[in-house]
Each structure stands twice: as structure tokens, then as C-alpha cells.
Image (spheres, helix red, strand yellow):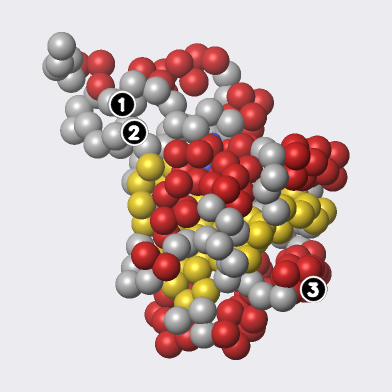
Amino acid sequence: MEGRVAIVTGASRGIGKGIVICLAEEGAAVLFTDVSAERGRACEEELRARGLEVSFLLADTSSVADSEAMARAALEKYGRIDILCPNAGIFPQTLIEDISEQEWDEVCAVNLKGPFLAAKACLGPMKRRRYGRIVITSSVTGPSVSSPGHGHYAATKSGVLGFMRTAALEWAPYGITINAVEPGNILTEGMKLHRDQDFIDAQQAAVPLGRLGTPEDIGRAVRFLASDEAEYITGQVIVVDGGQTLPEMQSAILPRLP
Ligand SMILES: NC(=O)c1ccc[n+]([C@@H]2O[C@H](COP(=O)([O-])OP(=O)(O)OC[C@H]3O[C@@H](n4cnc5c(N)ncnc54)[C@H](O)[C@@H]3O)[C@@H](O)[C@H]2O)c1
């Protein structure tokens, strides 16, 4: 990652912050965004104190102007964009019959339009240098599984994979790869805020590897897909879920090994 310049969206906490840390610890300079100025600045201060080359920009991933400003800021500060990680996401839990049009649009704007806008904003600089690594944070929720309350969320996390596959074909001639990670249940601030303890306990009990994931579990998978080693991989997903989506039957009745 030495000499690489990366952008990570929605990264003042949680998985995004884990991605920033994993990239910056290996030598990348990282510009990260968030809609919370206070958290963003605190995160920037914390990571700089750890000797990491990071800078924060207040930007809403659902805004064209902010996405373009984000790409401009990275170019102005670091002169290039090698890696983009569209990660910002929201996950309200609402039964489909109760989802308002406004809530549906909001989830789509952040989770589905956001990665499109971020990628489009960074495309020009990547094309010019014939190099790019884009790694989207999708989810197992939507592409492989779901649970009640995730109608809009699951739709966006599946939808973004369709976007990714098309972009992989359109941008391969420019040396730009685009892949995704599908996190399982990762214990983040967002998860603690939006899911109750019963949900978290039930998820943990269903993970064959015996624990919920950490932001760094996702950050390391993203780092691989963003690295030179992954140059022949495009349009693909890595599931990072501790084996949670593997069982053929409910985990409660799976035979337990000693
Ligand atoms: N935590 C999990 O179990 C899990 C599982 C699968 C996928 N994901 C995905 O991982 C990503 C991060 O989730 P998390 O658990 O770290 O959430 P989180 O809420 O802890 O962190 C998300 C960050 O994104 C920021 N954000 C929200 N809307 C934004 C916007 N419009 N523009 C820029 N930033 C914005 C928030 O302010 C927050 O700091 C999301 O895309 C989420 O869907 C999470």
C-alpha cells in the first residue's frame, strides 16, 4: 500500500474506520468522509496520533456535489486516486408494510446511489492513470440471505452488486477492478444503535466461528482486494461472515463438535 492513495466513505466509525486503519497501517494515504463532522474530526485526530496519514472530509455520499468534492479533495491533497471504498450505509429496520416512500428513497440514496456517485467521481482520475481498485461494502443481507425489516436494505445491497458487475466489464480496459465484500454481522457502533441485544445475541449464536465480526475483519479483506495482488480479480465478492450463512439447517439443531 506504500504510495497508494485511497478514499473511504462513511468512515468515522465502524467498518469504514476499520478499512481506513487497515489501508493506512500498510502505508496508504487515506482520505475518508462522513456526515458527522464531530466524529470525523475526532477519528482523524485519533488516527493521526497513531502515525497514520489520514484526512477527513465532511461529505454526504448521496450528493453529487459532495462526491465530486471528495474526489477533488483527494487529488488536491495527494495528487492521485488509486483506491476507492464506497462503504457508507444506513440500515433502518422496518417491516415492508411500514416503510414509507421517503425511507425507501433515503436507503437507496445512501446505499445504492452513493457507491455509483463515488465511483463516477473517481473514474476520470483512475482512467487517466490506467489504474484503479474499487471495493464496495455490500452485505450478506440481500445477496444471500435476509431477515424481517430489511426490505429496502437488502434490495440496495443486492442492487449494488449488479452495478459492480457492469462496472467491472466497462472499466476493465482501463486497468480498473471493482469488487465487493459481503460482511456478516459485524459489531459496530451502528449495529449497537440500530439492533437490540436479543438480535445481536441471536446473530452471535449463529456464527460457526463463535463470535461477531470486527471492522478489521472486513478491513483486511478489503485491503486484499485493493492490493496489487488482486489485479486479476474483478466483479467478484468475498463473504466475510465467520461462516454464518453456510449452514443448511438452523444452527440450533446442527451437531456441535467438541
Ligand atoms: N455492521 C454490520 O453488521 C454490517 C453488515 C453488513 C454490511 N454492513 C455495511 O457496512 C457499512 C458500514 O456499516 P457500519 O456497521 O460500520 O455502520 P456505522 O453506522 O457504525 O458506520 C457508518 C458510518 O457511515 C456514516 N454515514 C451514514 N450516512 C452517510 C452518508 N450519506 N454519507 C457519508 N457517510 C454516511 C455514518 O455517519 C457512520 O459514521 C454499511 O454500508 C453497512 O450496510 C454492515
* Dot label at residue 1: none
SS assignment at label 3: helix
Image spot of residue 163 (x, y percent)? 48, 68
Residue furthest right in the image: 38
Dot 3 crowding, Cα within 10 Å, few <14, some 14–19, many 20+: few
Image spot of residue 135 (x, y percent)? 50, 60
- Going 34% across and 33% down the picture, which residue do you hit? 242
N-terminal label among 3 and 2: 3
- Going 38% across and 71% down the picture, which residue do you hit? 231
- Going 52% across and 74% down the picture, which residue do you hit? 132
SS assignment at label 1: loop
SS assignment at label 2: loop
Image spot of residue 229 (x, y percent)? 37, 65
Q: Is residue 53 left or right of residue 84?
A: right
Give the residue at mark 1: 209
Q: CA distance from mark 1 to mark 3?
A: 43 Å
Tell me how many marks there are: 3
Disc 1: residue Cβ within 8 A of ligand 1's nearest atom = no
The quadrant in which the C terminus is found is: top left
Dot 2 crowding, Cα within 10 Å, few <14, some 14–19, many 20+: many
N-terminal label among 1 and 3: 3
Image spot of residue 49 (x, y percent)? 75, 39
* Dot label at residue 76: 3
Dot 1 crowding, Cα within 10 Å, few <14, some 14–19, many 20+: few
Q: CA distance from mark 2 to mark 1?
A: 5 Å
Q: Is residue 150 left or right of residue 232?
A: right
Question: Do labels 3 and 2 touch, CB within 8 Å?
Answer: no
N-terminal label among 2 and 1: 1
- Going 54% across and 15% down the picture, which residue do you hit? 197
